[in-house]
Image (cartoon, rainbow, N blue to C red):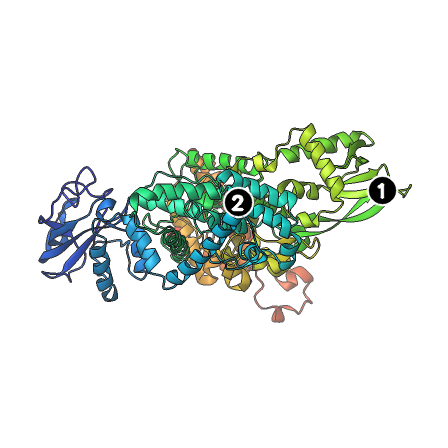
Amino acid sequence: MLTWNPKHFALGGEGSEDGSLNYNVGDEITWFCNSKKPVSGDTIYLIRLGEEPRGLIARGTVVQESFLEPDFRDPTKERTCIRFRFDELRLEQAQGSLPMLLLQCAFEKQQWSPQSSGIEIQPQYISGLNSLWESSRDKHSLEVMLRWCYDSEDWSNDWLERYKTTCQRVAHVRETGVAEEDDLSLLWYSRDNGIAGLRQGGISKNEFLQNRTFLEELTFSILNDPSPENHQSIYDRWSQEGDFKHINRALINRVFGAADPEKQTSGAINHAPGVIINALQKQFLTDISSTGNWSQDNQNLLAAIKPFIANDWDVLERNIALWHFYEWVYHINKSAKKNSSESTEPKTTEQTDYRSSSTMPAGTNTILYGPPGTGKTFHTVELAVRKADPEFNPDAAPNTVEHRTAFKARYDELVSQKRIRFVTFHQSFSYEEFVEGLRASSDDGQISYNIESGIFRRICDDAASGVTESNSRLDEALQALQEILGGEDRIELTTQRGNSFGVEYHGNRTFRIFPEQTSNEDLGRGYPVSIEHIQNLYRRTNLDRIYNSSYVKGILRHLMEEYSVPEFSDVPASTAANDFVLIIDEINRGNISKIFGELITLIEPSKRAGQPEELTVQLPYSKDDFSIPSNLHIIGTMNTADRSLAMMDTALRRRFDFVEMMPDYEPLNGVMVGPVNIGNMLRVINQRIEYLYDREHTLGHAFFMPLKGIDDEQALLQELGSIFRNKVIPLLEEYFFEDWEKIRLVLWDNQTKADDEQFILKNTEATGQSLFGSNYEGDALAGDNITYSRNPEALDNIQAYIKITSGSGE
């Protein structure tokens, strides 16, 4: 297989100036081939890399075996080439080029993004590749991809029969206007009804029976109007009129899929259409984007693919093929992510992720680890911004002050919107602070205990509902009400039934309610109404855990009317796709099992909400059902000088991608203090530390970065002395447990006799007799009477630094 990257090659090498192959069938050309194995008569395939649409675009035959030819980029060098004849060219997708996504799915173990041209196609794939090439001639690449997706799964035909049966039953219900118990059970309760299987997204038998009449109403509403507008209306009715623990979006989507298979696919997972749309954009260059509405996205993607696929597709077969397409995209993305995290090489442009960050199927868990001063905090800012706002792309060149400033400014904006939050773990940090726990509060001398959410619970709730500081008008209204009640005794409100009640606020996260009509004349401190429950009612989450609901509804209605808080459904849909980031600094200093508790399993990407293996737990204090949203990313930082990676909790290690950050000497190589190259000096120091201790206790380059902004020689030396005084020497003392002789070895102090060049002075003058009198007899047991002391004079002496790398002070 030969490679062609239109970005990298112009006339004189492979390809042409305008980024296309200006050749015809039968033309014989010379092409770079790193392998010397091809012989005359061998078949070659040419793959386009670097820019979409990537994939196989030509097939040919070798006419001349390996030979050397001057490199067109540097005529003084030679490289290995072959000569081949074009037997077939498919430069356009309409001609049947084989897309990269199809190649990655059909032939998983083959390397399709090689770093050099001329790799061998694995023998077990040759027959299948030739057959796929032949069968795809004059078909659009998308048609070829979808047909392969359907045919590659043995159980597609079995699914098709069950799919048809369910759709026929649904059509019968629509025609007759009668929905039997079995029909409703098939649509709303069955885990796998032929349309889509639900693992964790269904309702309980009890919920089904309690809401039977309501579900029948929804059924006919959907059958009579399976439009995107009604789709959103059904979501609203589910939360407002139904008695369910959750908004079961996948369940609702599945019924829409059964009602109108012409315009709705069988992909019930809420983000599935968006994932497909993003893959179509990237690989097949379709002019389509996700709206965030499941029903509308389905209609848009089906309309977009219609011109490119054959007219004889059965509607249900097409939908099955699209579901398999989604599963393959998800699989390829997951594999690319895994390979990228395991590789020590940077991710290349060929390791394309076919989903956009705003609709990624699962959140990410990353830990940046390394010795002190390696830029973990510096890189955390940029990584957090890239996770929370993938579209952010500053104009400044990378690794410049302007680039850093732009990312920091965007980071601050996202922090103010509460889309990025920060917490530091420590030895006493607990589950109650991180997830939820009881908090004691005093109200007029009365002690009460309220359940309060920790930072992790709060950001999970906000991510699940898409709420940020910039869109949460409710939070602003709550703050205003708290301020008003802080200066007045109470305000009077009414419930939906018109019953009056007073509201007071005494601090913390709870309002106090005093009903006007009650049999108890002395209410004491009143009924509690949690602010969190008001927020949950507004966002329609954990509705079954709301206490004193009539008063909660009354306060929420007042807030929406008085402060013009919009309906939650009116918040722009794009906010629901916002990504959130939780940064956990010093993650290795906390007791992981104590802090995360049962949630350690739920942070796995595959166990997040909306995933095929979604898990839900009941929290111990609030008894709320809880899952972790897929649009939450967790970034941890870990100082290996505090604890080795090998000592980390194994449960945590399995669930995070670890990115090593070691000292980087390149940024310091141009930094000179007198004749001392700071980058080289740091490299030598770290080599000695690694020899005497280990690589996890080296010194980071970030300690020395302040030197880059100084031009004055004297100021440079003073700053270098400050770095050694406040950073380098204290860390070395900590590393070596005040084994001063080893510190002297690291700093080359043992190789010079000049006191003013030694950072650590060695004093042998003190004896027991001089200190304790002539009768002192302990010297025989004390061994060498050596003391050590820091030497401030060396910090201002350039020779002390020169001798670290050169030994010139001997």
Q: Which amino acid lies under the numbered mark 1 shown in the image of this protein? A: Arg
Question: x%, y% of residue 615?
Answer: 56, 58
Instruction: Left or right? Give the position of 624 relative to 688.
Output: right
Name the residue furthest right: 521
Seen in the picture, residue 99 relative to 152 is either above or below; the reply is above
Q: Residue at x 83, y 38 (%)?
A: 514
Which disc is residue 156 wearing? none
Say if mark 1 contacts mark 2, CB within 8 Å: no
Where 768 sits versus 145, above or below? below
SS category of the residue bearing label 2: helix
Q: Name which quarter of the figure residue 548 lies in.
A: top right
Q: Is residue 515 left or right of residue 649?
A: right
Residue underneath mark 2: 222
Quadrant in which the N terminus is drawn: bottom left
**Local SS, label 1:** loop
Classed neighbour count for the residue bearing mark 1: other residues with Cα under 10 Å, few (<14), some (14–19), many (≥20):
few
Task: Name the residue at 38% across, 48% down.
Answer: 354
Residue 439 coordinates in the image, percent (x, y): 74, 49
Q: Quadrant of the C terminus?
A: bottom left
- Front residue of 260 and 424: 260
Amino acid type, label 2: Ile
Picture residue at 23% right of the left edge, 53% below the top? 136
Front residue of 451 and 541: 541
Provide the residue designation for mark 1: 525
Dot 1 or dot 2: first in sequence order is: 2
Residue 405 visible to an observer of this rendering = yes
